Image (cartoon, rainbow, N blue to C red):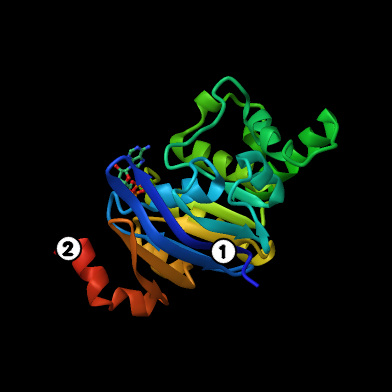
Amino acid sequence: MSILRAEGISKRFGGLLALSDIDIRVEEGEFVALIGPNGAGKSTLLNVLTGLTPPTAGHIALDGRDITHASTHARVRAGLGRTFQRGRLFGRLSVIENVMTGVANRPGRSGRELRELARAQLARMGLERFAEHAIGSLSYGNSRMVELTRALACEPRVLLLDEPAAGLNSGEVEDLMTRLRAISTERRLAIVLIEHNMGMVMRLAQRIVVLNFGSRIAEGTPAAVQADPAVLAAYLGE
Ligand code: ADP
Ligand code: MG
């Protein structure tokens, strides 16, 4: 059974059909990349999956349970974690406090336990030295890594990442790739990665889903998708 399954997802914004009858399945521990030109509907699909925006049509199931109408919080508790295309950290909180807001999605823990768990998550990501730093004092790259750490602190079973490498330098991209590969194998976490960096997609993804103008135009292994004429045409705007 797929850990995440969405069927017949459509999303209309006024006159614009941003998503048209999209089916997507993710298996436990699988690494899936979601690609497509700007405006293809990738972020909208993530927003629908995480409950940030309701679909116009379609159903979503997490681990076999229907979550189509569940709140974003209920989805996080059920095991759906995410990061945003434009980072969303709490600027007035320290690094560790931001990660604690992620751990807090697991109910019934004391403040002290939350702090210890958050510290362990930071250590796992090599960020412990920044624990007491203000978010605003971090480099852009480190703040994106804190965002990823916060998403992992929810102990998700599926992690949805919206362009996590955007704005990172090449060393940071390498570091991110190493971490993502380790996360997906060690935690048996399913990952859906939206990414424009094709080198990264080709090296990480087991399967690629391609959107264009709100429709799924291709799906398959990196090699198959790379050679697909419909995908090339979409990227060349033909
Ligand atoms: P991608 O992430 O693939 O670049 P998006 O999902 O952000 O694409 O956008 C898909 C389409 O939906 C675009 O044409 C975009 O302008 C439109 N869109 C996204 N969000 C909204 C919104 N809240 N209201 C109206 N149109 C939107
Ligand atoms: Mg986007």
Question: Which quadrant: the N terminus?
Answer: bottom right
Q: Is residue 110 above or below residue 189?
A: above
Q: Residue at x 53, y 67 (%)?
A: 25
Structural crowding at the residue carrying mark 1, measured as other residues with C-alpha within 10 Å and reported as few (<14), some (14–19) or many (≥20): many
Task: Decide: is 30 above or below 88.
Answer: below
Q: Quadrant of residue 26?
A: bottom right
Type of residue at label 1?
Arg
Is 122 left or right of 143, judged from the image as shown? right
Q: Image check: 32 left or right of 198? A: right
| Image quarter of the C terminus | bottom left
Q: Amino acid at mark 2?
A: Leu
Q: Quadrant of residue 226?
A: bottom left
Asked whether mark 1 and ligand 1 are closer than 8 Å, the reply comes as no
Q: Which residue is mark 1?
A: 5
Q: Tell me where residue 233 sits by quadrant.
A: bottom left
| Point 33% across, 56% down: residue | 214
Q: Rounded to the nearest whole Å, what is the CA distance between mark 1 and mark 2?
A: 30 Å
The residue where tag 2 is placed is 236
Q: Is tag 1's residue or tag 2's residue first in the polypeptide sequence?
A: 1
| Image coordinates for residue 155, horizontal then vertical, percent | 70, 50
